[in-house]
Amino acid sequence: MDAKEWTWDETLFSGSAAHYGIGRMPYPPSLADAVCHELDLDGTGRLLDVGCGPGSLTVLLAPRFASAVGVDADPGMIAEAQRRAGEAEAGAIEWRHLRAEDLPAGLGTFQVASFAQSFHWMDQPLVARRVRDMLSPGGAWIHVGATTHRGVTGEHPLPHPPPPWEQIEDLVARYLGPVRRAGQGHLPQGTRGGEEAVMRQAGYTGPTRITIDEERITDRSIDEIISAVFSLSSSAPHLFTDQLPAFEGDLRHLLQKSAPNGRFAERASAVEVVIWRP
């Protein structure tokens, strides 16, 4: 992603937050166990979840720490995180509407800083340096990578048909154009990569990698697939403007045609945890 082609703006995930809890497949509980084991967590220390979204990872990891802070640039995401954490009785989590580029923001030091599908939206060199200075001695940066809005292919049959993702993408392109949308701009080449080079230049060592690969089959409804689509920056509700009802109607028709009983099934993707140390 060329910085000249796209810059972040606050509409990136506008209207998407409420769709996360419905349309995104949850991280497996074993993810928290694996991180706890690898980092030798003992229930003390603080967690900083950067680009926390609706708190999916924050709420999962927070019980392994004395306290946690989740920060996100989207106010809707923070509101949804507060709501979901309250329902889950997740304990001592502070939620802050804050861009990662504005850290440290007086938040103090942390034993672990986590990023889940968020670092690629940020000014990576700047955020890597600032978060490094916020880690306590012996602390760690963890990047959790997984595709949670859709599943992956596998060898064994599923109890229901998989969602017709290629047709869904074609439908989105019919409404929004062939070039991926993101906020008020476009991403013709996708989001930026090169994380390893950024981390090394910022003074981190590693990485250590953990993979959680479980055979998780998820039964999904039409409404859940619709929410999965709206949870994406490339098809966030605001992008459709006054065509939103028409798009949702066409999407619902496509899904009903693909699964007359209204049920889909997918295999959840493997989760990779990349650990860096300052």
Image: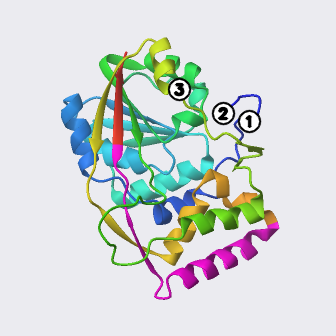
Mark 3 crowd level (few <14, some 14–19, many ≥20, 10 Å Cα): few
Can you see residue 98?
no
Secondary element under disc 1, as helix, strand or loop, is loop
Question: How many C-alpha atoms fall within 10 Å of the one at disc 1: few (<14), some, or many (≥20)?
Answer: some
The residue that mark 3 highlights is 194
Q: Position of residue 224 (x, y in %)?
A: 49, 71
* Residues at circles 1 and 2 in contact by the CB criterion of under 8 Å: yes
Residue displayed at 33% across by 51% down:
90
Disc 2 residue type? Answer: Met
Q: Quadrant of residue 6?
A: top right
Cα distance between the residues tagged 1 and 3: 17 Å
Amino acid bearing label 1: Trp
Which of the two discs, 1 and 3, sits closer to the camera? 3
**x, y percent for residue 65:** 28, 36
Q: Which residue is mark 1?
A: 6
Give the residue at mark 2: 1
Q: Is residue 261 left or right of residue 45?
A: right
146 vs 162: above or below: above
Of the pair 258 and 27, the residue shown nearer to us: 258
Instruction: Please tell me which residue is depicted at 73% across the width and 75% down the height of the picture.
Output: 245
Q: Seen from this angle, which residue lies furthest bottom?
A: 260
Query: Number of callouts in the render?
Result: 3
Stretch in magenta: 242-271
Q: Nearer the viewer, residue 119 or 111?
A: 119
Q: Amino acid at mark 3?
A: Gly
